[in-house]
Image (cartoon, grey):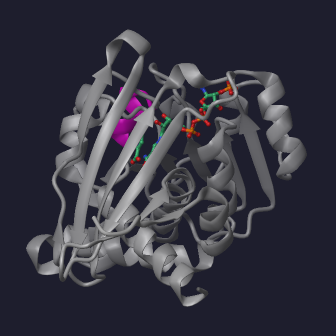
Amino acid sequence: MSRLPKYIEADDVKRILKMTDLIPIIEKAMGDFSKGEDGGVVQPVRSIIPVEKHGGFFGAMPAYSENDAALATKLVTFYPKNAGTGLPTHMAAIILFEPSTGELKSILDGEVITSMRTAAASAVATKYLASENSKILCILGSGEQARSHYKSLHHICNFEEVRVWSPTLKNAQAFSSQLKSKVCETAEEAVRGADVIVTATFAKQPIVEWEWVKPGAHINAVGAVNIKWQELSSELMQKSVVHVDSREAAMKESGDVIISKAEIFAEIGDLVNGTKEAQREKTTVFKSLGIAIEDAVSAKLVYDKHMENQ
Ligand SMILES: NC(=O)C1=CN([C@@H]2O[C@H](COP(=O)(O)OP(=O)(O)OC[C@H]3O[C@@H](n4cnc5c(N)ncnc54)[C@H](OP(=O)(O)O)[C@@H]3O)[C@@H](O)[C@H]2O)C=CC1
Ligand SMILES: O=C([O-])C1=[NH+]CCC1
């Protein structure tokens, strides 16, 4: 290699990436992904290997979008045990290439992109699936994803009340002191009566029950990214209309889907493409796992904007 590639660090990604730009780009990418080859997207289910000795996971997530000229791979680690140590639980780098030549263009910090693109994907799901009159947002978890979802979902709904619950009370209080919200003592208290619910936790056992959920509510279930883990009870999954980002990935990675044996109604991209009708009046779940194409198009957006200003 004749020169070092440009490294775009977290602070620059944070400065450049705006939710208002990101949400439509993620919406289009989810739609293209669900068109299969017709959408010009090539993306295998990611490889995740356990780093058993240290309780961590390492994932490789390659993707190519012909329409967006984005060719990239994200390398991501997630170490639940990092919680409380000062290190983030998720760390990532995205390596971006030029699709026409194969040249390495840039390496970007992947933490901010992971946080924001996941919240943008939930915003897209919420746009199609939440009641148009949604007033109460419930967030379970108070970490990185909880914060980014608070921000992204305010682009979709005019919430009058936000509730937060997290197992460590002081973490919920810290969230609430920075982002206007009410701390709840139990998950049940936070969930009952909410119109939109976000689960963004490292729970391995269900933390939300069917009978707590308001009929017609929409749930963005972001955690439990493992075949053995669940955030939502099997009854809740079975009785809701279930959506995913990738059917193939959900059948391989999602405990919420696999353990409950719930039927998957659609990918969010099917709603974007109009090939499945959104059932807004029913209780709906978006079981999000995170797909590589979201990272690739986000990284391309950041890179292009960064280069415009050089
Ligand atoms: N779908 C996707 O695309 C992506 C999904 N994720 C997943 O989202 C989830 C949240 O990630 P992130 O916000 O970055 O992580 P953080 O480490 O920042 O936050 C994790 C949160 O989970 C809570 N928590 C930990 N253990 C439990 C438990 N047993 N029951 C209930 N809550 C628990 C913590 O609560 P407290 O602090 O109060 O102890 C904390 O609020 C993870 O599962 C992660 O893997 C992440 C990236 C992308
Ligand atoms: O899509 C993603 O980057 C991840 N999903 C779960 C952990 C990291």
Image coords of residue 294 (percent x, y): 38, 64
59, 303: nearer the viewer:
303
Please tell me which residue is depicted at 39% across the width and 49% down the height of the picture.
288
- The quarter of the image that holds ligand 2 is top left
Residue 118 shown left or right of residue 297 in the figure: right
Query: Which image quadrant is residue 54 in?
Result: top left
Which of the image's four quarters has the C terminus?
bottom right
Please tell me which residue is depicted at 40% across the width and 27% down the height of the picture.
230
Residue most extreme to the top: 53
Q: Which residues are magenta?
A: 232-239
Q: Is residue 219 above or below residue 1?
A: above
298, 5: nearer the viewer:
5
Residue 233 inside the magenta-drawn segment = yes
Query: Which image quadrant is residue 50 in?
Result: top left
Residue 23 shown left or right of residue 188 in the figure: left
Image coords of residue 216 (percent x, y): 51, 54
Residue most extreme to the front: 2
Residue most extreme to the right: 177
Residue 94 inside the magenta-drawn segment = no
- The total of numbered circles placed on residues is 0
91, 156: nearer the viewer:
91
Please tell me which residue is depicted at 66% across the width and 69% down the height of the picture.
157
Please tell me which residue is depicted at 24% across the width and 49% down the height of the picture.
264
Which of the image's four quarters has the N terminus?
bottom left
304, 145: nearer the viewer:
304
Is residue 295 at least partly visible in the picture?
yes
Residue 101 shown left or right of residue 49 in the figure: left
Image coords of residue 23 (percent x, y): 51, 73
Query: Which image quadrant is residue 20 in?
Result: bottom right
Image coords of residue 99 (percent x, y): 21, 77
Q: Is residue 52 above or below residue 59?
A: above
Which secondary structure is most common in the magenta stretch?
A: helix
